[in-house]
Amino acid sequence: MRKCLQALALTTAILGAGCFNHLIYDSASVPEPTPVYDHWQHHILYGLATLSPPVDFRELCPYGVAQVENYISFANFLVAFFTFFMYTPSNLEVYCAEVKEVIMIPPTAPPPPAPELPGVVVLPPAATETAPVGPPAVEPR
């Protein structure tokens, strides 16, 4: 009996060591504080085959995805353990990128006036044009 319990404990420790956490994020975006998608993903045969349909991120986050996290929680592990890992769920959380306030300026609006600074001379646009940069032209003889 004792050897059976030791074998069960060892098997549980070995199979339980396979927990994972995948975190995919966009470093240029700030994620919203709450996920827009937080559901279980369903897998069978030790997680080798998935039963869940694909998630359309473009529909969930029209302004872009900031972070996606896929992990096995303790509840997921218990369900997998009691089904002998034939059914292995995982959690999937999707965080959209925070949308900043966008101010649209109509294209017909005139540019704002340049600030007047003492000692600064603003040249007209024709005086600021430069010659094309490149190798000198070679004339044939």
Image (tube, rainbow, N blue to C red):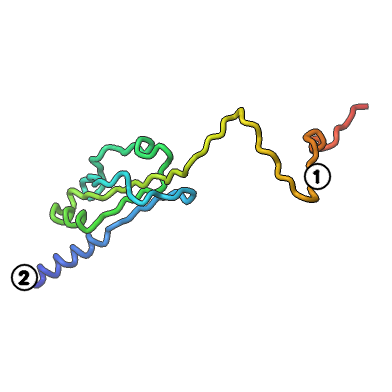
In the picture, the disc for residue 1 is 2
Q: On screen, 101 above or below 80?
A: above
Of circles 2 and 1, the one toward us is 1
Residue 25: numbered disc: none
Helix, strand or loop at mark 1: loop
Name which residue type carries label 2: Met
**Number of numbered tags placed on the structure image:** 2
Name the residue at 17% across, 57% down. 78
Is residue 134 among what the camera can see?
A: no
Amino acid type, callout 1? Val
Q: Residue furthest bottom?
A: 2
Residue at the location (29% across, 48% down)?
Answer: 92
Q: Is residue 51 left or right of residue 7?
A: right
Q: Is residue 32 above or below residue 4?
A: above
Q: Quadrant of the N terminus?
A: bottom left
| Front residue of 133 and 42 | 133
- 28 w.r.t. 132: above or below: below
Instruction: Tell me, yes or no, if residue 64 can be seen here.
Output: yes
Determine crowd level at label 2: few under 14, some 14-19, many 20+ residues with C-alpha closer than 10 A: few
Residue at the spot 23% in from the left edge and 45% down from the top edge: 43
Query: Seen in the image, is 12 located left or right of residue 132?
Result: left
**Image quarter in which the C terminus is found:** top right
Q: Could you tell me residue 71's position as x and y percent? A: 29, 53
Distance between the Cα atoms at labels 2 and 1? 93 Å
Counting from the top left corner in percent of width and height, residue 70 is at 31, 50
Residue 86 at x, y percent in the picture: 17, 49
In-front residue for pair 62/17: 62
Q: Which residue is mark 1?
A: 121
